[in-house]
Amino acid sequence: MRAMSPYRLVLAVLACVALAGASVTTAATAAPRVKPAATGTQLGTGTGLYPRLIRLAHSGDANGQLIASTVAFDPQGYGSIYRSTDDGATFTPIGQVRDPAAATGFCCTSIYELPSAIGSMPAGTLLWSGSFGQNGGDNRRMSIDLWASTDHGATWSPVSTVLTAANTGGLWEPEMHVNGEGQLTLYYSDETQQPAHSQALMEVFSADGVTWSSPYPVVSLADAGARPGMAVVRTLTDGTRIMTYEICGSSFGCDVYYRTSADGADWGDPAQPGTRIVADDGTFFRHAPTITVVDDGSATGRIVLVGQMLFDSGGQDGGNGTTLLTNSTGGSGTWQRIPAPVQVPTAYDNYCPNYSSALAPTADGSGIIEIATDYVGTECDAFYATGAL
């Protein structure tokens, strides 16, 4: 069984420090601001973890703007929201999401723009979700909360608590998507089914964002030690949904897998692991994958994938932390390597360097914008850059 991920562990530590009333940036502030290994421009100031990036497409005059989010601390955790109106050349902080539940731990957020109305929320509403309560003590009950913004990320209001754990197991890494039936779907990593499943990928559905269905399995393997998690869902240009995720645990090495769905609700047999992603030169990612889709004129669009670390048959590859993989056949067939816009050559199995980086296409589809994290001294900061496709 894989222990708590480095990212989840550090968020628990930061939450402890916050509860104690100390500044989580004390050590980082005292340390010299040495040049990070990562390239790119720093996003904001101070700690910025678990970046996410979307381009508005259902927001009227705001369409085309980029909205980014990170997990920040001051000392209590909050969601930090940024906007770019120049296609990723610069980002400006515009808002914060401050959920009181962050006082007992805060982790792994996501941001999403509604393509159609959900309940009273119109198309163009921004949604934000995160995991809370990981530091709630021996009898903790973690939750996933949902917030909404109707002014493109400047101000936020609570919508619902999507899930509350029935036991002390974790609820991690929410990801949102409106499925083909018009329901808001939230995917998450579930540790509450132990010992039968160390972790499973699950989904819940809602017609209004307030009332949610019972959970359904997406990836739930017979191997009790398997840990599928960190789902990211995007829509290909032909309407097919694609999900990437890692599988860690006793028989898996945190390699990256994918599966597809016609509607974003039914993902096939949850007892099957899916398809492992391997490039045409034999390299593959481990840990914390994310994807974006570029409309390149192909039938499905060009999928661009990032993972924390790059391996080959002999171990860590020379392109570790500096590589993306792409595919223009819906995930099947071959994947090819291209340089990553933000280079993090020191990436390793740790909550910070190149962990769960964010990707979005440039407005004309000729490039890719990336936000990745790396240490500056002892502080984990986010950096952004644009590269060619």
Image (cartoon, grey):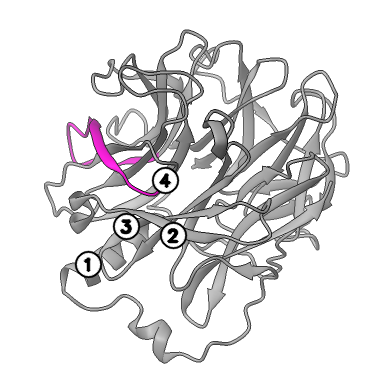
Query: Which portion, as a residue range, is magenta?
Result: 153-173
Q: Earlier in the sequence, mark 4 or mark 2?
A: 2
The residue under label 2 is 6
- Earlier in the chain: of badge 3 and badge 4, it is 3
Give the spatial CA distance, label 1 vs label 3: 15 Å
In this rendering, would 76 be left or right of 203?
A: left
Residue 10, quarter of the rendered image = bottom left
> If you read the primary sequence from the N terminus, does the residue marked by circle 3 or circle 2 appear first?
2
Q: Amino acid at mark 3?
A: Tyr
Which residue is more in the foreground, 26 or 66? 66
Distance between the Cα atoms at labels 2 and 1?
Answer: 15 Å
CB under 8 Å between callouts 1 and 4? no
Q: Which residue is mark 3?
A: 78
Quarter of the picture containing the N terminus is top left
Q: CA distance from mark 3 to mark 4?
A: 14 Å
Where is residue 318? Give x, y as percent.
81, 63
Badge 2 or badge 1: first in the primary sequence:
2
In the figure, 334 relative to 317: above or below?
Answer: above
| Residue at x-position 33% and y-position 28% | 196
Q: Position of residue 74 (x, y in %)?
A: 30, 70
Q: Say which of 316 and 90 sits in front.
A: 90
